[in-house]
Image (cartoon, rainbow, N blue to C red):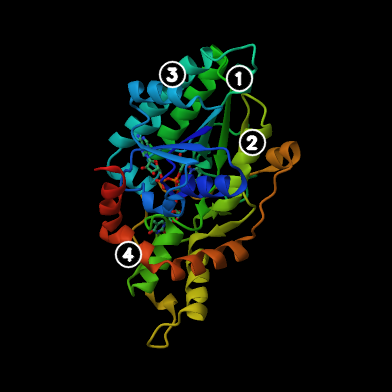
Amino acid sequence: MIVVTGGAGFIGSNFILDWLAGSDEPVLNLDKLTYAGNAANLAALAGDARHVFVRGDIGDAPLLARLLAEYKPRAIINFAAESHVDRSIHGAEDFIATNIVGTFRLLEAARAYWMGLPEGEGARAAFRFLHVSTDEVYGSLAPVAPAFTERHPYEPNSPYSASKAASDHLVRAWHHTHGLPVLTTNCSNNYGPYQFPEKLIALMIVNALAGGPLPVYGDGQQVRDWLYVADHCSAIRRVLAAGRVGETYNIGGHNERANLDIVRVICDLLDECAPRADGGSYRAQITHVTDRPGHDRRYAIDARKIEHELGWRPAETFDTGIRKTVAWYLSHADWVRGVQSGAYRDWVATQYGA
Ligand code: NAD
Ligand code: DAU
């Protein structure tokens, strides 16, 4: 059994679906079901005894103690977080509560559980706490600066990245001070199925199809390093299986692109796969809007450590991944409607209780 927190979110749900497609090891999914948590992402697992869903908060210490004692996992993978930079600018309270205090409570619960594991049977030595983090903790790169290595100083600029940086430091400290066997991954921007349409790629696809504006912040020349979500999931599985305890691993796909170029690629794919009724291009919907405050100009990941040490490689290029993503959104209009209408919340209530 492994515990996945935040498993109803974008990356967590992809991770659980991929995990159970390749393994019969059960997953306990602890998720608070915030606006970003969508249990319908896991509808394919309805009735599957290998997936145990618990609606709850990683900050709930008694709940954590009870779940760990009952399910006795060999690992905890912490995806749960408030994840959207723009929301952290408008209000950081939830980011502090979940990303910092929640991670602290999860670490404390994991430590108490791990210390109680029998040493003789190897369970204690085998236990892992894998913390899923972001490249945004490293701050912003100059246009020609080398990509982030694991030794790059932490220079977080947004309330979101500051809260993730704090959580990374807590994880590190719980290893160095208490010996908890931790692993940390710092990944670049993900895209793919089940992404909530507030993040750039999902938002642009959904807005374009709805005939709405495609809001590009500032000049649109900010650079992100894009990774297809299934590749992030395979990297996490690899780190969990073979990563060295106490180490951090950067994850990225060598896909640096300017935001405006991303939006244009999406428009061109939609022109090809779902042409506008009026025969015009979706590019006509691109609208430059006021820039994000404190907007980081460039992120780029140097992934040589995970590639050389653990033999991980991404399977998708940006061209193959974005084509799959656009095709997924085109064939999942119901999912998009559900997320936008809040219907999935009703579904959740009938499945798990409000
Ligand atoms: P998401 O916002 O789609 O999902 C977050 C999930 O966590 C949701 O299901 C939500 O209900 C749950 N959650 C929130 N607060 C909780 C709490 N207190 N207790 C339990 N569950 C809670 O996020 P995502 O994009 O899937 O990101 C997952 C993780 O990966 C985050 O830690 C994020 O920082 C990290 N990350 C994301 C990206 C990216 O591009 N999206 C890149 C690198 C790292
Ligand atoms: O780098 C990893 C991080 O990537 C993760 O840790 C975060 O959880 C995830 O949200 C993401 O952060 P970004 O801020 O880079 O992602 P977002 O999709 O919000 O924005 C990507 C870029 O596109 C960024 O430069 C801002 C810009 N943007 C975004 C939106 C939503 C726009 O120009 N217009 C938009 O409407």
Can you identify the residue that label 4 sits on?
A: 337
**Mark 4 and mark 2: span between their CA atoms?**
35 Å
Q: Residue 108 shows which numbered tag?
A: 3
CB atoms at circles 3 and 4 under 8 Å apart?
no
CB atoms at circles 1 and 3 under 8 Å apart?
no
Sooner in the amino-acid sequence: mark 2 or mark 1: 1
The foreground one among 265 and 309 is: 309
Q: Residues within 10 Å of mark 2 (few under 14, many from 20)?
A: many
Three-letter residue code for mark 2: Val
Q: Residue 239 shows which numbered tag?
A: 2
Q: Secondary structure at mark 4?
A: helix
CB atoms at circles 2 and 1 under 8 Å apart?
no
Q: Residue 230 at what x, y percent from top left? A: 57, 52
Mark 4 C-beta to ligand 1 under 8 Å: no
Q: Residue 123 shows which numbered tag?
A: 1
Judge whether residue 293 can be spotted in this image. Answer: no
Q: Residue 308 at what x, y percent from top left? A: 75, 40
